Image (cartoon, rainbow, N blue to C red):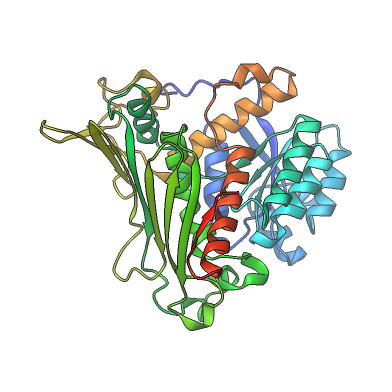
Amino acid sequence: MINGERQTKAAIRWAMVGGGKGSQIGYIHRSAAERDRYFQLVAGAFDLDAARGRAFGVELGLDPDRCYADYKAIFAAESARPDGIRAVSIATPNNTHYEISKAALEAGIHVICEKPLTFTTAEALDLQRIAEERNLLVGVTYGYSGYQMIEEAARLVADGTLGEIRLVNLQFAHGFHNEAVEDANPAIRWRVDPKFAGPSYVLGDLATHPLYLAEVICPELKIRRLMCARQSFIASRAPLEDNAVTLMEYEGGAFGTLWTSAVNAGAMHSQKVRIVGSKASIEWWDEHPNQLSLEIQGEPPRLLDRGMGYLHPETSGDDRISGGHPEGLFEAWANLYYRFALVIEALDEGAPDRVADLRYPGIEAGIEGVRWVENCVRSADQGGVWVDYS
């Protein structure tokens, strides 16, 4: 990776639905997808306002004839073209993810979707069925999982450095919505409206990020039951929560906690993952993503840095520059898109075994995020009781 050599035969013709002017997330999708020349943006349906979306696409340098009014138009037209798109990224409000993803898959187009993938587990399983029938990718943009030190954390757990895993302590608790900021910001307003956001706010929007990181780091841990309490400190957000605490019992005896909040006043992201074993602990903080804390009982604590020779070889495989130089969120997302490209090419060539061991957030990650939110909401709405994970 450090030499920037392409690992696929050609750039994948790619489009976006959503992610237009004013989007919080559209620019990072485009930058990450095209950073290493694995994807080429050739079409889009960027906005609910067709004229505004078309103008934005032209600003991006697209052919005006390939700037479409909506997702139905783009999939119909592009699937009929010999040079049509092979993949689409979906960066729209939550309530549209299922219908747009399903339409893309039925048109034979690979899908990369924002999370949560769907409102319900049943919908997510339906997407999985269609994708498997048509040999297509469904990728979910858990962008933080592209950081290299998450891979190092997973390797330390796998090689036994931590011993038996006992505790999983997760949080994603920022303070930027400690007031009703949505009153003046449409980009935030839909996130606290059940019609658009679904059954949760911070559980689906924030908590699923560290949850997926824990799944990457400790893949053997499976939730047995959980208990969730959620609050709406800004009353107008009810029934959706802006703060929640979830307790999790794992099969085998490990225990987990996940605090997620948008009202942690004064805090930036405060996304942290701490894994405690019988021998040692590790901790990763997204505000210092190039470092991983390793604390071995009876030894001085140490801080591991990205790009260094003492890391596992698999960790260094995504280096874009030598150690000592910081890499950030755009590089992490680009690592995801690089993996998505490898999977798409392998599936298109009928060689899925080629990427069988590749780590990336696929349809299973999307399903699990939706399932976890459903269980949290079920527990919270019963008064914060323990529920068997189903």
Along the horizontal axis of the image, is 269 left or right of 12? left
Relative height, residue 65 to residue 238 (above, below) = above
Quarter that holds the N terminus: top left
Relative height, residue 320 to residue 106 (above, below) = above
Give the image location of residue 139, x and y in percent.
62, 39
Count of numbered tags: 0
Give the image location of residue 191, x and y in percent.
57, 68
User: Which quarter of the picture shows residue 172?
Assistant: bottom left
- Tell which of 282 and 44 is nearer to you: 282
Does residue 251 show up? Answer: yes
Which residue shows up at 80% across the image and 59% down it? 69
Which residue shows up at 33% across the image and 61% down it? 268
Give the image location of residue 357, x and y in percent.
55, 21
- Tell which of 125 and 187 is nearer to you: 125
Along the horizontal axis of the image, is 19 left or right of 333? right
Give the image location of residue 122, x and y in percent.
72, 50
Does residue 330 show up? Answer: no
Which residue shows up at 60% across the image and 57% down it? 374
Which residue shows up at 66% across the image and 24% down it? 10
Along the horizontal axis of the image, is 100 left or right of 358? right
Along the horizontal axis of the image, is 19 left or right of 209? right
